[in-house]
């Protein structure tokens, strides 16, 4: 158990809908990272938050947004969902100045 | 364009064999290279290599970073069936924040 908690574990939703994925980082970790893993593209970095502020942005679509709350948990919002958004979404966390990131178990999103 | 390439894509070996996995990268503002093992769900951290720590070893696993060749190898000696997994290489770029680029992984299958 990495200490990073993601909910829900599985999510099935229809195209055009909006979902929210939640991540609780390890105790004491200030950085949260979101990744998307699909079969054909491997693991893609989406976005990083550090202590509530956006720190780095990767290949994140405009339909997606994220935030990190004062208690350091983070949410990834996916809207206007398309079939191609079906993937495993990982959250990872790390301490300040330490780039060793620990991954949650992921949320499997299926868009039908 | 920043990218990380892993080879081979897939590998099948017998128990007891030694394997070498490769990772090459083209990333500006390189900060570190990380190896992860992904079995069923969440990637688990193996090693982090930086300019000040270019060789790491843990049991049967070892890794070397070649900053001149912009590459790294992950060696696994005396492989066991439990080593079967996807091995991911990630490179951290220090741009605005810490951005991670992942390779597509090497799938290792160890057969008895």
Image (tube, grey):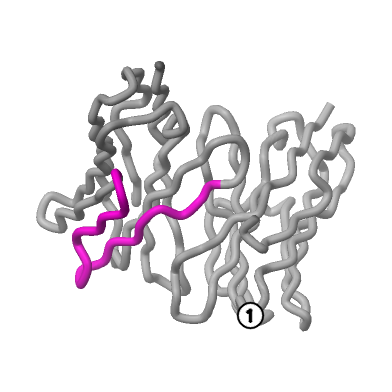
**Which quadrant of the rendered structure holds the N terminus of chain A?**
bottom right
Please say whether residue B104 is visible from this viewpoint: no
> Could you tell whether B84 is left or right of A7 in the image?
left
x and y, in percent, of residue B50 in the image: 26, 66
Q: Per the image, is B49 magenta?
A: yes
Residue B24: image quadrant is top left
> In this rendering, would B86 be left or right of B79?
right
Q: Position of residue B45 (x, y in %)?
A: 46, 54
Number of numbered discs overlaid on the protein picture: 1
Dot 1 alpha-carbon crowd within 10 angstroms: few under 14, some 14 to 19, many 20 or more: few
Mark 1, secondary structure of its residue: loop
Q: Quadrant of residue A21?
A: bottom right
Taking the image as shown, residue B7 lies to the left or right of residue A12, namely left
Residue B78 image offset from top left, x and y in percent: 27, 32
- What residue lies at 75% left-to-right and 71% top-to-bottom? A73
Question: Is residue B10 something one can see in this rendering?
Answer: yes
Taking B42 as reference, is A50 above or below it? Answer: below
Chain to which the residue tagged by mark 1 belongs: A
Q: Which residues are magenta?
A: B43-60
Q: Does the magenta run of residues contain B52?
A: yes
Depth check: A102 or A32 in front?
A: A102
Residue at 59% across, 73% down: A31
Dominant secondary structure, magenta: strand
Give the left or right position of residue A57, taking residue A76 as reference.
Answer: left
Q: Which residue is mark 1?
A: A28
Task: Work out whether B3 lies above or below B96.
Answer: above
């Amino acid at each position: 158990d990495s200490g990073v908690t993601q909910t829900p574990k599985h999510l099935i939703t229809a195209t055009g809908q909006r979902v929210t994925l939640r991540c609780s980082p390890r105790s004491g970790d200030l950085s949260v990272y979101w990744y998307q893993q699909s079969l054909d593209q491997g693991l893609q970095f989406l976005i990083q938050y550090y202590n509530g502020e956006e720190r780095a942005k990767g290949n994140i679509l405009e339909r997606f947004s994220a935030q990190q709350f004062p208690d350091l948990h983070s949410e990834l919002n996916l809207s206007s969902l398309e079939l191609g958004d079906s993937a495993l979404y990982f959250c990872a966390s790390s301490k300040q100045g330490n780039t060793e990131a620990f991954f949650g178990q992921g949320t499997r999103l299926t868009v039908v | 364009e920043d990218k990380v390439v892993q080879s081979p894509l897939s590998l099948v070996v017998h128990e007891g064999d030694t394997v070498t996995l490769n990772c090459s990268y083209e990333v500006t503002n390189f900060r570190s290279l990380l190896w992860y093992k992904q079995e069923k769900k969440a990637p688990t951290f193996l090693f982090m290599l930086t300019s000040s720590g270019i060789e790491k070893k843990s049991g049967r696993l070892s890794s070397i970073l070649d900053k001149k060749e912009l590459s790294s190898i992950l060696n696994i000696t005396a492989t066991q069936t439990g080593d079967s997994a996807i091995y991911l290489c990630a490179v951290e770029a220090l741009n605005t924040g810490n951005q991670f680029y992942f390779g597509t992984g090497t799938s290792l299958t160890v057969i008895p």
